[in-house]
Amino acid sequence: MGDYVVCISGASGAIYGIRLVEVLTSHNHAVRLVVSDSGRLTLLHECNTTPEEVAARTGAFLEDAENVAAKSASGSAKIDAVVVCPCSGTTIGKLAAGISDNLITRSAIVAMKERRKLIIVPREAPYATVHLENLTKLSSWDTIIIPASPGFYHHPKTIDDLIDFIIARILDHLGLGIELSERWTGDEIDV
């Protein structure tokens, strides 16, 4: 089983990070959870929970976002991938500038330098030009960018269906065969 770092920054959409942790841990993957101070506020406001409660409920290992010496920040640690979900515009800017001033940015930059998989899930609308430029820069460095923009071709019935659509895309890019939503087959429309 894999060892994944899931980071929740202060962008709206904390439920995406929670759901990713739930799915990974329910499939016996080790998860190191890192939540920024702003992410902590967003978790409480949007999901009425704390990082400690998410970790206790899922079995994830909660790391201190200020501890840049934690395992998640190590180039020699066995980490399969780092996912920043959701990823704020501030975090995007720091990553594009090479700033590693907390465990989220340090873990992501270490993933880039070690050529580990790095996935960021921006949740901004609209994107400012500076966001687009920074996302382009990160993409050119092999960062996978999966905006929290769910599709509708699978006919979602609930908010959970929309959330799982994004989580399924993340899981695909992690190379995990976990099915959460229906895939397009090409037979859906009779032309």
Image (tube, helix red, strand yellow):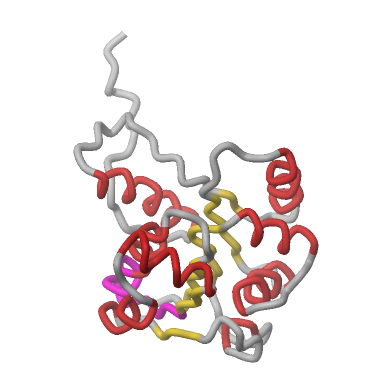
Residue 113 pos. (x, y %): 74, 71
In this rendering, the answer to whether 72 lies above or below 157 is below
**Residue shown at 75%/58% (left/top)?**
96
Q: Quadrant of residue 132?
A: top right
Q: Front-most of 96 and 81? A: 96
Q: Quadrant of the C terminus?
A: top left
**Residue shown at 46%/46% (left/top)?**
148
From which residue to which does the magenta span run? 22-32
Query: Is 76 on the left or on the right of 98, as rendered?
Result: left
Q: Residue furthest right?
A: 97
Residue 105 pos. (x, y %): 66, 71
Residue 84 pos. (x, y %): 54, 63
Q: Front-most of 134 and 187? A: 134
**Residue shown at 66%/59% (left/top)?**
90
Q: Quadrant of the N terminus?
A: bottom left
**Does residue 29 show up magenta in the picture?**
yes
Query: Is 102 on the left or on the right of 174, as rendered?
Result: right
Residue 4 pos. (x, y %): 48, 74
Query: Is 34 on the left or on the right of 25, as rendered?
Result: right
In this rendering, the answer to whether 10 lies above or below 113 is above
**Residue shown at 34%/81% (left/top)?**
55
